[in-house]
Amino acid sequence: MIWAIVRNGFRALRRDRGAMILSFILPIAFFSIFGAIFGGMSNSGTPRIRALLVDEDRSPASERLVGALLHDPSLDAHTQPEVKKGEPAAPDYTAASAEKAVHDGDAPAALIIPKGFGAHPIGFGQAERAPIRLLHDSSDPVAGQMVAGILQKDAMTSLSGTPVRDAASNSMGFVAVDVRDVIGEKKQKSMISFYAAGIGVMFLLFTASAAGGSLLDESESGALDRILSARVSMTTLLAGKMAYSALLACLQLTLMFLWAAAVFHLDLFSHLPGFIVMTVATGFAVASFGMLLASVSHTRAQAGAIGTLLILTMSAIGGSMFPRYFMPEAMQKAGLLTFNAWAIDGYTKVFWRDEPITHLAPQVGVLIGAGIVVFLIARRFARKWESV
């Protein structure tokens, strides 16, 4: 009797595709994603950190140190901006251009070797040394610490023959470092926007999935046939459902950011124009996802299972669960295939980097463009209801 109950349970599970996906495919998908992230790190070490180098000293000691940093396998170091193939080489970074690049998000850190560094590059105690400036974008809290540690290691190896000031019995010493956050000194609360965007987009996708599922409910109940027979076209119906879902998404994001402003002191109102633009674009994109999910599914249960699998997968590689800058490069690029990554990048530009609305063009363009394409695909799949 017990075996018969077990057998019937597995038969029911086999017939329920949604339960099958949630029971077996979803765990494997998540294991694969996080295995690719952390497994890649264990095989090749931590991801290479992009750092900009400026040598204002031009002394033999500074040149040796720059050479060591450029060849360090843990760093993706550059002394000049990258250019496209066939274009002339760009001039070397200066202190000002490197600081701007860090501010704009081109690199999380920059090292400025000042004039006078070569006179006493390494030493102990209170020696009068010109400190190397480490410019850091604190939206990436790990990169600055990693670059500082790599700098000390490379200084000890490349400058091992340099005389050490204020060290009676030591042949090597440390370089002095002055660390400064380029855009994070007065923005401790702005990282709240990163978490609001990341978590918000993930739950918006679930909301859009549920809103789109109303089409499947109407189809199963016969209400959809009555709606379509009342001179309402499928395009109009889908557009109306999508408009409702997009408006609901915008209201949810607004409430979340208002809560962040009230409880966590997020500076929302001085960034209101950028917030509105990103919220409208994000709401439109996630609403299109809900329409597509409903159009390609046959039942509400199937839509729920497929939606859960896709949403959690998109959120994992798109940065809602785990910051993308910690991921291997391949995973970071894969994240650009999700709405999550573009929305988070856009909100980061608004709240963290204080960039103008015009700089949101890449993020807004991708979200709106992808939303339109996804809606058109959903409209094509929705023809199945017109033929019934």
Image (cartoon, rainbow, N blue to C red):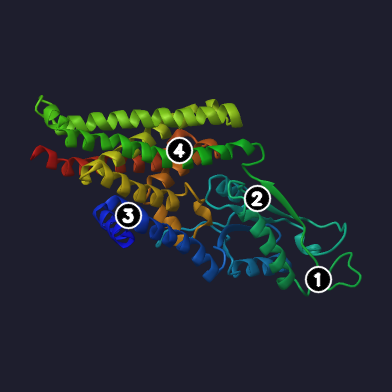
Q: Nearer the viewer, residue 202 or 351?
A: 202
Q: Earlier in the sequence, mark 1 or mark 4?
A: 1
Q: Earlier in the sequence, mark 4 or mark 3?
A: 3
Judging by the rendered image, the residue that carries numbered circle 3 is 21
Per the image, label 2 sits on a secondary structure element best described as: strand
Q: Earlier in the sequence, mark 3 or mark 2?
A: 3
Q: Give the numbered dot on residue 200.
A: 4
Question: Mark 3, mark 2: which one is toward the viewer?
Answer: 3
| Residue 121 to residue 196: above or below | below
Crowdedness of circle 2 by 10 Å Cα count: few (<14), some, many (20+)? many
Query: Mark 1 near mark 4, Cβ–Cβ under 8 Å?
Result: no
- Give the residue at x 39% y 58%: 29
User: Which image quadrant for residue 14?
Assistant: bottom left
Question: Given the image, on which type of amino acid does mark 3 rest?
Answer: Ile
Q: Is residue 285 visible?
A: no
Question: Given the image, on which type of amino acid does mark 4 rest?
Answer: Gly
User: Which image quadrant for residue 56?
Assistant: bottom right
Question: Given the image, on which type of amino acid does mark 1 rest?
Answer: Met
Distance in Å between CA atoms under marks 4 and 2: 31 Å
Q: Nearer the viewer, residue 156 or 118?
A: 156
